[in-house]
Image (cartoon, helix red, strand yellow):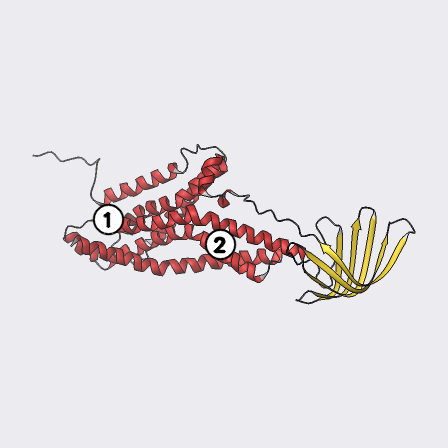
Amino acid sequence: MRRILDRYVVREVVRTCAGVTPVLLIILVGTQFARVLARAAAERLPRDVMFELMGLKTIEYLTVLVPLAVFFSIVLALGRLYRDSEMTVMAACGVGPARLYRPVMLVAGLTAALLAWLAFDVRPVVAYRSHVVKIEAQRDLRANLITANRFRSTPDGSLVFYAGSADEDGGLKGVFIQRRRGDTIELAVASRGVQRQTADGKGRELILYDGRRFVGIPGTIDVHILDFEEHRIPVVMPKADISPDDPEMVLTPDLLVTGMPEDWAELHWRLASPISLMVLALLAVPIARSGTRDSRYDRLGYAILVYLIYSNLLGVAYSLVAKETVSPLVGFWWVHVPVASVAIALMAWQSGWRPFRRRRRAA
């Protein structure tokens, strides 16, 4: 009978989780999509880059989303059992609320193992990939300097570009270019031109056709005027710094080597993903207890409140470890242990344990 009960509770939790997770994912992706879209528009990132960043961010959010989804799923699944009087029947058969921990922790344990892999192995790789995609997109954007009816320049100011019109294939019309080399300034105007990548793929170049060059030193009358049919101008592409500049991009073994406070905080943050899932699963069982006339969603408000408090405390713990206010040996345990203790105390209380209740003396 116990195995049948375990399978039944596991099935209810998994079924509820399969419905809750997509809803939470849609909400989270929807809120973050507006932010990513605004940032992409401000930085003028291409559309394909924007969607790739959105997909990578979604993978990163799974380490936060999965514990929340499992927590809510346990509360909702057990809440339905209480509402439909199934828990009353189980109690009549000698199955108390504490007996629910076996199937619940089975689901939580398997999910926590998957979550640990995501947090320790997948998330830093995805975060680094997001960084690389963004930096390379910005580099290509800076290299592709010419846009229609707008003056643009290289980061060092050595080249200034302007074109009356530009098409998607790199074709230009009405081109003006100023190039500074030491004290010498070169001006070039051309009726048409094209911007494209070099043959080796390491840079870009501008090819001007049917134009005129003016080369001289400002303040002097020594100016050379040259007509040309074709003139090539190399554009040095700015080097992209793609080295990890954030602890969340560093691989987990490397975090153990550096010993920096920020790296310790990041290590504890990754460890908090599977641990928080187990702690929330402990809390979900006593929180889900309700009456037969209560809705299965009545306890969801308490679950949301508990999650907000717990997650905010983890955020505070991250800051304290990063600032060396709290020792890395203590880490986030000052948050995990009290919350888990509260969960155990609640379940013990609901199971009838009253350590301070006075016993009646026999008459």
| The image quarter in which residue 197 lies | bottom right
Is 262 above or below relative to 14?
above
Q: What amino acid does circle 1 point to?
A: Arg
Residue 308 in picture, x, y percent from top left: 41, 47
Q: Secondary structure at mark 1?
A: helix
Mark 2 nearby-residue class (10 Å; few <14, some 14–19, many ≥20)? some
Q: Looking at the picture, tell me which residue is in the foreground, 105 or 117.
A: 117
User: Going by the image, does 9 lie left or right of 266?
Assistant: left
Q: Which mark is residue 297?
A: none
| The image quarter in which residue 343 lies | top left
Which residue is disc 2 drawn over? Answer: 57
Residue 258 in picture, x, y percent from top left: 49, 35
Q: How many marks?
A: 2
Q: What amino acid does circle 2 point to?
A: Lys
User: Going by the image, does 60 lie left or right of 355?
Assistant: right
Q: Secondary structure at mark 2?
A: helix
Which residue is disc 1 drawn over? Answer: 102
| The image quarter in which residue 163 lies | bottom right
Q: Please name the residue shown 45% across and 56% down the image.
A: 28
Residue 196 in picture, x, y percent from top left: 68, 61
Q: Please name the residue shown 64% across and 54% down the image.
A: 202
State which quarter of the image contains the N terminus: bottom left
User: Going by the image, does 60 lie left or right of 342?
Assistant: right
State which quarter of the image contains the C terminus: top left
